Image (cartoon, rainbow, N blue to C red):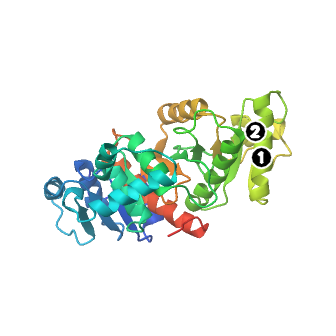
Amino acid sequence: MQKKIAEDSFVGKIIAMSSSIKRRVVFSDGNDIRLAKALSIFKDYNDSRFLIIGDETTIMNNIKETGLKNTENFCIIDPKKSGKVNEYREIIAESYKNRCKEITCEQLDKCVFNPSYWAGVMLKNNEADCAVGGTISSTGDLMRSVIYILGLAKGRKFLSAAAFMEIPECIYGLNGKFLISDPAIIPKPTEEQLTDMAITGYETAKGIFESEPVVAMLSYSTKGSAQSDEIDMIRRVVDNVRMVYPDMKIDGELQFDAAVVPEVAAVKCPDSIVGGKANVLIFPDLNAANIGYKMVQRLAKAELCGMIVQGCAKPFNDLSRGSLVEDIIALTAMTLVQRKGMEENGLIQD
């Protein structure tokens, strides 16, 4: 990968969103050479403080291999050499206790040296503003750190996932840009979970899009063309969301074509404030969302940034273990954008 990223590329556009956002970003998988390569590039576009958790020798060797000279904004954190082990152990134990979750001494000893947990404690202690992990550690470790250590954002009851995608040469959505949810976390959302998902998706999109998000609750039915308990639930979700955000542009139930194609919306839902204009797509369950985004990614050659974990007290986002350097750069930039958006929405409690 070249040291310069094209401004009009997908990654370049995400970097541009974050260029003026300076925060403390902690990386839980600091031993990964891909992270060193990503930060050797991203540092030229952003002045954030990069806190890298892992083995000090490994991280130094990785930085050396990238040829990186200026590490002024880098801080290596080796838990095995840290003087905070006892403090962090107590915080983890207390966090589990507060959530009525048992943890043995043996499990506690493992957790305190687990980089995902270490990053979670740093966020909880206000020693970092946001976090990125997942290239080495499991999603399970990251999620447990969020649930038991970091906790949820103010007013949120659930975690969910979102992905930001851009489809080339697409006239729909926001010039081909969409936020979709939830392709990763909640298998079969309840009414309360789907309501929370729509609200957090809207709040995430507000921090990303240059215009007001337009949210569609997707279904196999459009405005009563079919009847079922699931469709009734989607309609109740729309009413629930409007009680929280009365001015939010949201509608449902809508089929995908009615949600994004103006000509179809004119026939199927001419009175909808969302029909033909949607750029935030809330799927009814994980099956539909996961299949849908992967179809678009492969068949329409969409570019993807995610997974963005929604509902955390502070952003802690999850990369795939198969991530490329470009993916790490994009999600790091997006995590900074998410942090700023949460601040503006009053969701951060330091």
Q: How many marks?
A: 2
Residue ID at (28%, 64%):
84
Callout 1 amino acid: Val
Give the answer, above or below, for where 2 lies relative to 102. below
In the rendered structure, the answer to whether residue 78 lies left or right of residue 43 reads: left
Secondary element at image label 1: helix
Check whether the beta carbons of the residues at disc 2 and disc 1 lie within 8 A of each other. Answer: yes
Residue 141 lies, in percent from the top left, at 39, 43
Q: Nearer the viewer, residue 175 or 75?
A: 75
Q: Nearer the viewer, residue 22 or 44?
A: 22
Q: Is residue 335 visible?
A: yes
Disc number placed over residue 234 in the picture, else none? 2
Residue 7 lies, in percent from the top left, at 41, 59
Residue ID at (45%, 58%):
335
Q: Is residue 261 visible?
A: no
Residue 94 lies, in percent from the top left, at 43, 57
In the rendered structure, the answer to whether residue 78 lies left or right of residue 327 reads: left
Callout 2 amino acid: Ile
Residue ID at (54%, 38%):
183
Mark 1 nearby-residue class (10 Å; few <14, some 14–19, many ≥20): many
Residue to which mark 1 is pinned? 238
Q: Nearer the viewer, residue 312 or 104?
A: 104
Q: Which of the 4 image quarters holds residue 43?
A: bottom left
Residue 209 lies, in percent from the top left, at 59, 58
In the rendered structure, the answer to whether residue 129 lies left or right of residue 186 reads: left
Q: Which of the 4 image quarters holds residue 149?
A: bottom left
Secondary element at image label 2: helix
Mark 2 nearby-residue class (10 Å; few <14, some 14–19, many ≥20): many
Disc number placed over residue 107 in the picture, else none? none
Q: Which of the 4 image quarters holds residue 263?
A: top right
Give the answer, above or below, for where 38 lies relative to 235. below
Q: CA distance from mark 2 to mark 1?
A: 6 Å
